[in-house]
Amino acid sequence: MQKTRRTVLKALLAVPPSLAFLSDRMIAQAADLSLTPSCAGDEEETLEQTQGPFYRPDAPLRSSLGPAAAGQSAFTLCGFVIDTRCNPVPGAIVEIWHADHEGNYDNHGLGWRGHQVTDAKGRWGFDTIMTHHYSFRTAHYHFRIKVPGRPLLTTQLYLPDHPRNENDHLFDPRLLMTLDRKNVVGRFDFVVAA
Ligand SMILES: [Fe+2]
């Protein structure tokens, strides 16, 4: 029993204390993005998309995948996980993985991969870099959202007006992020079944 408590405490201490307020800060840095999810109460569940070949398990718990190096552009992705009735979903595991600034995945290590757990308001956010298109794929970020007791949601997010979007048969406009005016913050609210 005591060992279990210690293990749980250790896990909690491993979470950076700033994580809970991270996505508010991220959203607030883009003054033109709403601080609350846009939700009418009859939302459609977020569209599922293929996982693709480059998923790797055990992505670390972290909110910053960077920092951006020379030649890379810093980019922040953030938003909420809500259900179809607009309720925030706390405790959801949000996992991200994406190609780097040249369209390459880290298939040996865990670069540009991470996960976090939504806070009481259902918020998530990652500081990372702008990804790049590769092969027939337009620029995209992969996500898996796991809510306890519900099916895994696997999907991808896209950038508005990316010149490759229309040539990628997997692209779907329902998965477009909203960008701030400076194009450095992308916002998307994942919707899961109520
Ligand atoms: Fe991909």
Image (cartoon, rainbow, N blue to C red):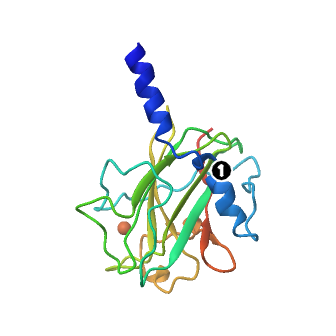
Q: Nearer the viewer, residue 192 or 118?
A: 118
Say which quadrant the N terminus sits in.
top left
Residue at the image position 38 percent from the left and 76 percent from the top: 137
Left/right placement of residue 22 relative to residue 96 reads right
The reply to whether residue 139 is in sight is yes
Where residue 100 sits: x, y (%)? 38, 74
Where residue 60 sits: x, y (%)? 38, 50
Say which quadrant the C terminus sits in.
top right
Residue at the image position 60 percent from the left and 75 percent from the top: 184
Where residue 123 sits: x, y (%)? 63, 49
Q: In this view, does 97 lie above or below 100?
A: above
Q: Is residue 73 above or below residue 114?
A: below
Q: Nearer the viewer, residue 90 or 64?
A: 64
Residue at the image position 56 percent from the left and 38 percent from the top: 91
Q: In which quarter of the image is ligand 1?
A: bottom left
Q: In which quarter of the image is residue 10?
A: top left
Residue type marked 1: Phe
Left/right placement of residue 158 relative to residue 188 reads left
Left/right placement of residue 141 relative to residue 57 reads right
Query: How many other residues sit within 10 Å of disc 1, few (<14), some (14-19) or many (≥20)?
Result: some
The reply to whether residue 94 is in sight is no
In the image, the residue with mark 1 has its CB under 8 Å from the nearest atom of ligand 1: no
Where residue 43 sits: x, y (%)? 68, 51
Q: In which quarter of the image is residue 114?
A: bottom left
Q: Mark 1 points at which residue?
A: 21
